[in-house]
Amino acid sequence: MPHSERALTLPPRDVGDADPAIVAILTKARSKLGFVPNMYRNMANAPGLLETYMVGYDAFRGDSGLSPAEQETVLLAISRTNGCEYCVAAHSTIADRSGVPAEVTDALREGHTIPDARLDALAAFTTTMVQSRGLPAAAELDAFFAAGFTESDVLQVLLAIAIKTISNYTNHLFHTEVDGAFASRLWEARS
């Protein structure tokens, strides 16, 4: 999606900030990731926003029961549907590092059929959930279940949508620059 003409002008924050709440949340992020992503620096303008994102993200990663490839399928499907160039680049890089086959990641990035039927069903359902605002048709739920997913998996997709909405929309509002760590997988949204 094209960016709005005007971005928010709040400054990116850093661990040297004067606000102790910002320092605390960014220090926590840096200790987990080894650096502070540009997205986090923007989110830190509202420490509760970044904290909510990080808690939800960790819960999805740690407790979803989905494999790394399934997690990246969900996160990329949401980010692509929302047109978030930053998150598609970041999750493509994470997918590459997690051993997700390039043909799977590339299909997700382009919105093509994934060469793995289970992952394709997961991407289709996730996209439906975003586009329908959480109102999938019975047939769409049935197709998701037929691929081997459960009602609990529906709720994990919902959790991922919640956290990716926070990150995707933050990146839209700030026109967040993609970090160098993710630059090899730049992606451009199409109108």
Image (spheres, helix red, strand yellow):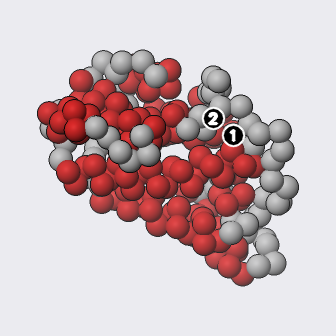
Residue 92 or residue 51, whichever sits in front: 51
Q: From this viewpoint, is residue 10 visible?
A: yes
Give, as a three-letter code, the residue at label 1: Val
Label 1 element class? loop
Which mark, residue 187? none
Residue 134 or residue 184, whichever sits in front: 134
- On the image, numbered disc 2 is attached to which residue? 85
Query: Quadrant where the N terminus lies?
Result: top right
Q: From this viewpoint, is residue 144 visible?
A: no
Residue at 60% from the left image edge and 65% from the top image edge = 50
Label 2 element class? helix
Residue at 65% from the left image edge and 24% from the top image edge = 191
Q: Is residue 17 left or right of residue 51?
A: right
Mark 2 and mark 1 lie on one chain; the one further toward the N terminus is 2
What's the distance in space between the residues labelled 2 and 1, CA to CA? 8 Å
- Disc 2 + disc 1, Cβ < 8 Å: yes
Give, as a three-letter code, the residue at label 2: Glu
In the picture as drawn, the residue positioned furthest to the bottom comes out as 20
- On the image, numbered disc 1 is attached to which residue? 178
Q: Nearer the viewer, mark 2 or mark 1?
A: 2
- Looking at the picture, does residue 116 appear above or below residue 79? above
